[in-house]
Amino acid sequence: MLNEAVLVSRAAFLGDKNAYSQLVVAYLSPIRRFFFNLTNGDEERSKDLAQETFIKAWLNISSFQAAAKFSTWLYRIAYNLFYDEIRAKKPTVGIEQAPEIGYDHSTDTHLNMDFAQALSTLKKEERTAMLLFYMEDQPINKISGIMNCPAGTVKSHLHRGKEKLANYLKNSGYDK
């Protein structure tokens, strides 16, 4: 793959679809994984959201400013897309009546299901920060850019998220 900055420039200024395709190939898997974890294992929804992310990025690539890395900008689009979708959906059942969230893959263990359930107990900001930091190996400053909040706030989300996950897993019997 050519230098990321060259590919972004070619896509943004020349409308080079081949250059953009190389960016898609480079970031498709991480963006899908990000959505997969945010959606508690809903693979089809993850694929759809990833596709929407790349379409939106292509349509707006000319507005990309090199003040941030392309990946930060792309994750920001993904983050906004996911939470816009959540805000647009009106809850039809109360939280007490909602079905238990978990992965539906038969090869997953109870721990994965419990972890998915534990993640679903976090506030959206905590879950996003945890997934970006621990699952996507993103640094605090990049998460700050993606979530559009100060680095200290990201650290707070991570701290609260870790505490909540630890308590959930401990109460589920994983401390033995």
Image (spheres, grey):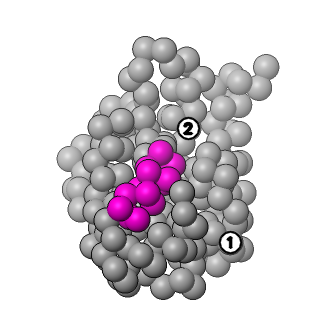
**Nearest to the observer: residue 32 or residue 66:** 66
Magenta range is 18-31
Residue 42 position in % (x across, y down): 36, 36
Tell whether position 138 is magenta: no
Tag count: 2
Residue type (three-letter) at the residue carrying disc 1: Asn
* Residue annotated with mark 2: 118
State the residue at coordinates (43%, 46%): 32
Q: Secondary structure at mark 1?
A: helix
Q: Residue 29 has which mark?
A: none
Main secondary-structure element of the magenta-colored stretch: helix
Q: Is label 2 in contact with label 1 (beta carbons under 8 Å)?
A: no
Q: Residue 141 has which mark?
A: 1
Q: Quadrant of residue 142?
A: bottom right
Q: Is residue 53 visible?
A: no
Q: Is residue 168 above or below residue 38?
A: above
- The reply, left or right, for residue 99 in relation to residue 137 is left
Residue type (three-letter) at the residue carrying disc 2: Ala
- The local crowd at label 2, few if under 14, some if 14 to 19, many if 20 or more residues have their Cα within 10 Å, is many
Residue 66 position in % (x across, y down): 54, 83
**Nearest to the observer: residue 8 or residue 167:** 8
Tell me which label, 2 or 1, sits earlier in the chain: 2
Residue 153 position in % (x across, y down): 65, 72
